[in-house]
Image: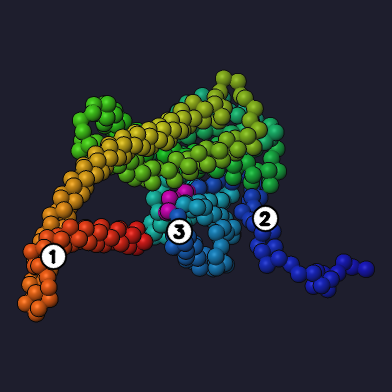
Amino acid sequence: MFPLPLTALGLNAHPLRDELDQEFHARPFERLKTPSLISHLALLSGPGRAAIDQDRAHIARLCNHYEVAPPALGAVHLSVDCGAFRLKWERHSEFSAYTFIAPTESVEPFTDPPIHYLPPDWLAQLAGELLVATHLDLRREPDPPLTLELLQILLDGGPLNGCRAADDAATVWSDFRVRPDGFTRILVFDRGLRETQAGRLVQRLLNIETYRMMAMLAFPLARQTSAEINRIEERLADLTDHMSQRAGLEQDHALLAELSGLAAEMERIAAAATYRFGASRAYDALVERRIVELREVRLPGVQTLREFMDRRLAPALRTVTSVRERQESLSTRISRAANLLRTRVDVALEQQNRDLLQSMNQRAQLQLRLQETVEGLSVVVLSYYLVGLVSYAVKALSKLGLPLNPELVTGLAIPVVIVAVGWGMRRMRRNLAQHDLGG
């Protein structure tokens, strides 16, 4: 019995299962026959869907020109036979790589590369800025092998880097220099490569060339950032020195404002450099991985590809790493200085508030004494008027025939009125105080 499909088994597949499985088989290696000549371009066109769509549309125009199937909607890679050459396109996060492969029968290496077959107007309209341009010549190793002097002539006389690769099935030569035509050159001698093995080797070599240049993009930015960090470090040292001088709260506020400005400037620098520095580290890891996959074997008297990268690429990337660490350290130092100064400002403000509260308390006590004095006068005044009213009332009653002595009654009423007014004022003040506490 044949195996039943999932649908017949009643199993529900995850909606992303096919997409995830296809990702494992995306960007396959080409099968390369020897001899072949390869032209490789990498253009930095930036991240984002718009850039990807633009590159895909441009590839589709070339496919239409050669009447072959264009990339599918949403595709980020394509491998198609255009007749005289084979096209391989790969879209990465921030650049597109174009590889053109053609068989060659030329005895002299690097003669008539496949990029010459392309429509000039199509090449001129490629989006982005060219970062990598390489010719790679894959041919049978001559017998006897070429001497180092002859190889230097074929590669325009530069100091060569070379190694045996792919389990001794190939010999790789290059000086990684850009020639007057704008291309670097890599010469690969086939010592028994299978077609799939040749495709993997060529892809790894092109990846090394592309990723090393992408990694180096951070180096000029690191030098520029280093100069800005030096300037900010000097200013931070001046501000820290001023912090040790207690010049008052107003001066501390000014220093805190300057530290805040430095912190904002460091955030601006970090925003401009963090992505590039992180990408450089990722590309460096890819270069290291591709070199490991070459399985290099040293040739007598020749620097290997790893040694070349260790001498040239590694120091530049160590500079990038150093600048990134200085940037992070400086941000921390600025933040720490700002926190210390902010603490000092807060303490000074608390002391000012304490002094202000003490002054307000003293004024309140003075106002209370003044209020008590005024209240004493108020009792006397109110008592005087009330005694006057009592006097008038007694005299009126006396005129009506009541046996009252106005002077005696008025005199006796004075202490009673004073006690009553004082008791009333105190009760009113107590009621108001309870109302304020309750409110």
Number of the label disc, if any, that sits on residue 409: 1
Which residue does the image show at 50% across and 52% down from the upper left? 93
Quadrant where the C terminus is found in the figure: bottom left
Residue holding disc 2: 25
Secondary structure of the residue carrying tag 1 is helix
* Amino acid at dot 3: Gly
> Foreground residue, 66 or 99?
99
Kindly report the distance in space between the C-alpha atoms of the residues bearing marks 1 and 3.
Answer: 105 Å
User: Which percent across, then down, holds residue 393?
Assistant: 11, 73
| Magenta stretch, residue numbers | 41-46
Q: Is residue 134 left or right of residue 3?
A: left
Q: How many angstroms separate mark 1 from mark 2 (CA)?
A: 121 Å
Q: Quadrant of residue 51?
A: bottom left
| Residue 45 magenta | yes
Label 1 crowding class (10 Å Cα cut-off): few <14, some 14-19, many 20+?
Answer: some
Residue 142 placement: quadrant: top right
Q: Is residue 389 above or below residue 122?
A: below
Kindly state the secondary structure of the residue where label 2 is placed.
loop
Instruction: Name the disc covering residue 48, or none.
Output: 3
Dot 2 or dot 3, earlier in sequence:
2
Q: Does any portion of residue 76 appear in the rendered image?
A: yes
Q: Is residue 300 left or right of residue 417?
A: right
| Image marks 1 and 2: residues in contact by CB distance under 8 Å | no
Q: Is 364 situated left or right of 45 in this image?
A: left
> What amino acid type should be assigned to the residue bearing mark 2?
His
